[in-house]
Structures are given as C-alpha cells and as structure tokens.
Amino acid sequence: MRATDLEAVAARLDEAARHARPIAGGSTGLTDTGEAYAVQEALVARMTARGDRITGFKLGFTSLAKMRQMGVSDLIHGRITDRMRIADGGRYDLGGLIHPRVEPEIAFLLGDTLRPGGDPAAAVAAVAPALEVIDSRYDGFVFSLPEVIADNTSAAGYAVGPWSAPGDLAGLGVLLELDGRLAQAGSTSAILGHPLRALAAAARLAGELPAGTVILAGAATAAVPLPPGTHVRATVATLGSVQFGTEEEPAGDPGPRRADRTPEGSS
Ligand code: 0L1
Ligand code: MG
C-alpha cells in the first residue's frame, strides 16, 4: 500500500476511537504486518500530537487462551500512553469506549535499558499485578492480524497495582474478579511459559526499551466484557491486587475519548 493509504487507515482508526464508531474488520485492505506497524506508528503519532505521552509497551497474544479467543497465533505489540492510565482503586469512565473488555496481566518497570539479547531480569526494577482494558476499533472484535496491529493492539486503558521487587514469577496464580465473582483464573506460566520471556520478546520486537518504561507482558487468561457499574480486580499470588470501578456510560455522544483520561502521575 502507498504511504498515503496507510495514513488514511490510521486516520480511520483514530476517528473510530475518538467517536466510538467502529469500522468493519476486513475493510482496511491491510495484509502485511510491516505495513500494519507503520499504520500503528502513524496512529500513535496522532495521539502524541494531541498531547499523549508514551509510557510503555504492551505485548498481545502471549498466552494460548488469548490466541484461541481471537483465532491468531502470532505475538503482537503496541504502545500505552499516560492518558490510558487508570488509577489503582480509582474510577474509570467507560463513556466513549466501544465494547471494552478487561484482562489480567503482569506489568514490569524497567530500571535499566532493555536490549535485544540482553538479560531481561537484570533490566527489571519492579513487577506488579495489572489490568488491561482493550477496546477494538473493529465491529464485534472481528479483525485480521494486520488489522489488530494497526489498531495499536486494541489498547484502551491500563491499571498497575503495587510495585514489588522482582522475585520468582513462575507459576503464580492469577485471578480476575468482577464484583467479587470469579471471571477468569490462570497462571503466570500462561504468559509464554514465564513472564520474563515476554520481556525478552519485547526487547526483540522493540529494538531497545529505556529505563522507566512500563511493559504489559500480556494477558494470563482470556479477556471478559467490562460493563459499566462494575468493580474489577486482578490478583496475582505474592504480588497482590489491582482494582478499579467502572462508571455508568453517559448518555448521548461520548465525544473524543482520550481527552478526559487522568494523565500519569496526576492522581
Ligand atoms: O492481548 C492483547 O492485549 C492484545 C489484544 C488485541 C486483540 C484483542 O482485541 O483481543
Ligand atoms: Mg493485553
């Protein structure tokens, strides 16, 4: 595809997100993952031009549960920004989202530059339980692999719980609860066999990630729909919990959806 066509796909996805109006999967003409990442870059550039600050990197489809749920078999990656951040214990307004889902994850905080082929454990300063909200900009979460890559891997929101010094992360139990009821249960081993492997993959895919980057390692379970008026909590054994409550959707036109998120560090 020509550069102008890739930019046009980025513009369509951006408008879909800002006005909560999904587009049809299969309508982008994307068939190549390299071109899809070029669209993602253009999409993220639109966000940063509006004032978003990139805070981290996310991996998707790192677990069999997620691959099966979405019918794909490749690891993908995207960007998270300060306006996607949800305060632990806070409220999260779903207004302006299309059809949000939530999934439990592990977050890493880099204390040192993470380089391809480097020792991922040595670069990690801290680890935390995390929740990711995904909100595909495609109708019904139906898309091809290049299309979900172009859509910044459905990134919409993320919450990070208390940071701990990194310990043994193998085989830790992961629970996702909605209003105190178990929605999903899994293990950190579902993330590529060990969450540190996700870090190695992130370094390979990103090239180099600087100290201070937050990395979402990917979901330990399938994602579940996130309704308004819900208390959601993820618990990872030994790491603790992260939680937030969702607000009722406001009536009427939701308007631009990224403009009203809490910037990182301000809550
Ligand atoms: O696992 C992820 O965070 C990537 C999600 C992309 C696919 C989806 O929308 O489920
Ligand atoms: Mg995820």
Image (cartoon, rainbow, N blue to C red):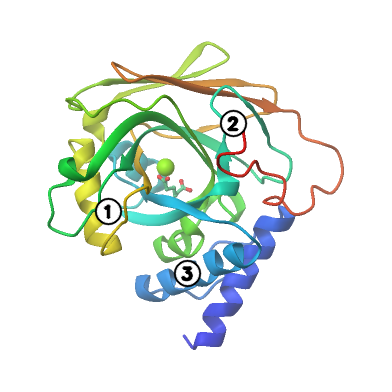
* Quadrant the C terminus occupies: top right
- Between 78 and 55, the residue placed more toward the observer is 55
Earlier residue among tags 1 and 2:
1
Q: Of the numbered discs in the image, which one, if any, rests on residue 149?
A: none
> Which quadrant of the picture is home to ligand 2?
top left
Residue at point 13%, 54% (across, down): 118
In the image, farthest residue toward the right: 252
**CA separation, marks 1 and 2?**
27 Å
- Answer yes or no: disc 2 within 8 Å of ligand 1: no
Question: Residue at 16% across / 42% down in the picture?
Answer: 122
Whether 184 is drawn above or below 55: the answer is: above
Gap in angstroms between the C-alphas marked 2 and 3:
27 Å
First in sequence: mark 3 vs mark 1: 3
In space, the residues marked 3 and 1 are separated at their CA atoms by: 16 Å
Label 1, secondary structure: give it.
Answer: helix
How packed is label 2: few (under 14 Cα within 10 Å), some, or many (20 or more)? Answer: many
> Cβ(mark 3) to ligand 1 < 8 Å?
no
Q: Nearer the viewer, residue 20 or 80?
A: 80
Please name the amino acid that badge 2 sits on. Answer: Leu
Q: Give coordinates of residue 75: x percent, y percent.
A: 30, 54
The 10 Å Cα crowd at callout 1, few under 14, some 14 to 19, many 20 or more, is many
Secondary-structure class at tag 2: loop
Three-letter code for the amino acid on which mark 3 is drawn = Glu
Q: Nearer the viewer, mark 1 or mark 2?
A: 1
Q: Which residue is mark 2?
A: 226
Question: Dot 1 corresponds to which residue?
Answer: 202
Considering the numbered disc 3 on the image, is that residue within a helix, a strand or a loop? helix
Identify the residue position indicated by label 3 in the image: 41
Could you say where residue 96 lies in the image, as x and y percent from the top left?
A: 72, 46
